[in-house]
Image: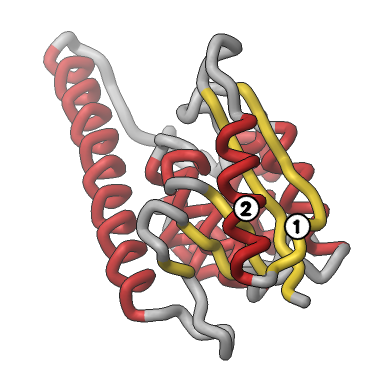
Amino acid sequence: MTKVVIFCRVSTKVQDYQRQVNDLTELASLKGWTVEKSFCETVSGATANLNRKELVAMLDYIAQHDIEKVMVTELSRLGRDTLQVLEVINLFNEAGVSLYIQNYNIETLTPEGKINAMSHFLITILAEVAKMERQTIRERMESGYENFISSGGRVGRRPGYKKSDDMLLVEYAEELRLLKKGISLRNVSKLTGTSVNTLRKCKALLN
């Protein structure tokens, strides 16, 4: 029997996630899948993954119980922040766990554990959206620098300045967390926009 877990999310306490659980449980039964556990949370979709207790608990659970699939009614149940959703999907892919998305009726992985074509298309779109989001953030930062300089401010490192290990640990906490999970430098770079060279410095701190 295929072992699966259900993940549900609603944004407010007024909403009820029981319908999501019921629909996915019935669907799993029709497909001959065994629902091992359901993870349900009431939290904004923009909340950072690290602060989503049920999501973190699910990631730990699937790693310890040989779960083959995670079921959601729609992709937005994983979150509304594109970067965060993309991170979760990549974590699933790395673990060989397929994400079943009910409203699209697709899975991210084939029975052989390969990324399927439709899923690849979806992830490509997500990656492009994430790229645009990072570009928007970068443009805002650049605009802020220009305003700062035009007001007489100075930017850039002082001569001989070098970031300390402690500063790297603080500034790149999210990148370090992903590296600890064994995600490759290239994939972490794709997820966070941080250069591979900087990630190498971060990874050296873990040794």
Residue tagged 1: 35
Secondary structure under the numbered disc 1 in the rendered image: strand
Of the numbered discs 2 and 1, the one sitting upstream in the chain is 2
Q: Quadrant of residue 174?
A: top right
Q: Residue at image x 48%, y 44%?
A: 84
134 on left or right of 139: right
Residue 184 seen by the camera: no
Residue tagged 2: 26
Q: Quadrant of residue 137?
A: top left
Residue 11 x %, y %: 51, 21
Kind of residue indicated by mark 1: Val
Residue 179 x %, y %: 66, 60
Mark 2–mark 1 distance (CA, rounded to whole Å): 10 Å
Crowd around label 2: few <14 · some 14–19 · many ≥20 (10 Å): few
Up/down of 43 relative to 109, above or below: above
Labelled pair 2, 1 in contact (Cβ < 8 Å): no
Q: Quadrant of residue 2?
A: bottom right
